[in-house]
Amino acid sequence: MKRRLRKKEYLLVASMLFGLLFGAGNLIFPAAMGQAAGSEMIPALVGFCITGVGLPLLAVTAMSLSASEDLFAMGAKVGRSFSYFFTCALYLCIGPLFAIPRTATVSFQVGVVPFVSPAGQSAALLVFSLLFFAVTLCFSFRPSGILTWVGKVLTPLFLFFLGILICAAVLSPMGGAAASPPTEAYASHSFFKGLLEGYNTMDVLGVLAYGNILIRSVRLLGLSEPRDISYGTIVSGSFSALLMVAVYGALTYVGAQSRSVYGIDANGGDVLHHIALHYFGDFGSILLGITITFACLKTSVGLITACSAAFAGLFPRACSYRVYVISFCLFSCAVANVGLSRIIDYALPALYFLYPISMTLIILCLLEARIGYRRSVFICGIVGTSAAAIFDLLRVLPPAAGDILPAYALLCAVGAALPFSSLGMGWMLPAAAGILIGTCAAYIRDRRSAK
């Protein structure tokens, strides 16, 4: 009986996970963070890697150790009603509401905007997004071919081009990476600012959505025992995590260098364009745009198919898989025309709400692997986290949305009173308190059952 994967198989699974996760946000946010953090880029990068790399790896570990086949199974440990809500909210967030439209807008920002006048950018975005999602729609009906081809060809091509860009930046720096002072957001608590920026990659949410694919792939390679599957999954995830850390570090470093030449750009798409333009002129800008467009297209197809399959499984009588694919493509196309910066702004409240719940669920599944399943621990931990996460959501609402909410100022004041709320970590103590209460309740119930 096979107990371990071969080295090539570990790399194959790691490459698949990297290909599924590495998309638009993984490109733009480290570069923008490096530019804004300046001399504080190292602590910011460490924080970014904790939420952008460490937590996704923990999510893979939690899913494999808890023997959960998919996200719904993890959520069902709290309750089926919660699992329906959380699964739908997570897939909508990494799907048609934010992540899928972002794949089109990042491609447009890097590949098209440099060649279009400001007056024509709205019309160009509409045409580009229609074409982008028309291609996504076609391949989402038959996803296997493009995902295989793009994963084997375009992801290595992108990494090769990025490697050339990094080498150029190291050999001929635009400026001192640590010479620029940090912006106000990074001047104090740069580590925690980086920690929160890691939310934007959506990789924890992505791993929870894609984790069943990873585990299934390890099983198809010949492992059958749960312990062996967990080991293979964790090792493969670790290789993927190391590659992501290397890419994030490089993007942050080059982004910090670009500050001395271009100042602070509006978003990470502009940062990447300016870097490619600086070293390779118009040719570099075109090549980067084409490569990123196909990399984002791969991510778009993967997300559309994952979301459509998930909703078709959750609500089999509502719509067919093909109807979900068409609906999500049309909706994502409409959202994409809002623009990259506005998508990022409106995604933040959802991320500030879903990330704490995701992290608590991951921690609870890891605890379950050590102490066994206790439903009261799951329920109380998630209730405490959710209550506090609502205040984090309110705190980062766009002003236009906050102004229409009743008692908005009062609710924000209550949220600000939570310990560590200024660092975006106001959910931690309520989560810990909920887990403690749930543990005590489980202990009391066990004592009564023993009598």
Image (spheres, helix red, strand yellow):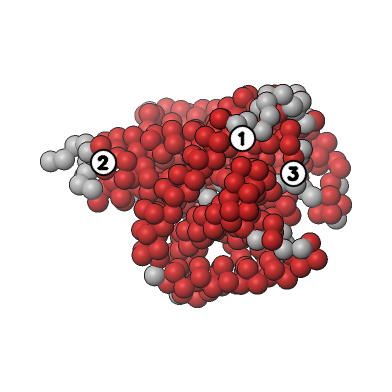
Q: Secondary structure at mark 3?
A: loop
Give me the residue at 30% from left, 35% from top. 231
Quadrant for residue 94, please give it.
bottom right
Disc 2 vs disc 3: which is toward the camera? 3
Sequence-first tag of 2 and 3: 2
Give the x, y percent position of residue 21: 48, 48
Quadrant in which the N terminus appears: top left
Query: Looking at this view, is 426 or 430 the one in front?
Result: 426
- Per the model, the C-alpha gap separating discs 2 and 1 is 31 Å
Give me the residue at 76% from left, 25% from top. 181
Which residue, given by chain and number where applicable, does mark 1 sit on?
254
Quadrant in which the C terminus appears: top left
Which residue, given by chain and number where applicable, does mark 2 sit on?
8
Which residue, given by chain and number where applicable, does mark 3 sit on?
265
Give the x, y percent position of residue 369: 37, 33
Q: Amino acid at mark 2?
A: Lys
Q: Amino acid at mark 1?
A: Val
Query: Looking at this view, is 361 or 374 the one in front?
Result: 361
Q: Secondary structure at mark 2?
A: helix
Give me the residue at 46% from left, 28% from top. 443
Q: Residues within 10 Å of mark 2 (few under 14, many from 20)?
A: few
Query: Looking at this view, is 92 or 179 the one in front?
Result: 179
Q: Is residue 120 left or right of residue 269?
A: right
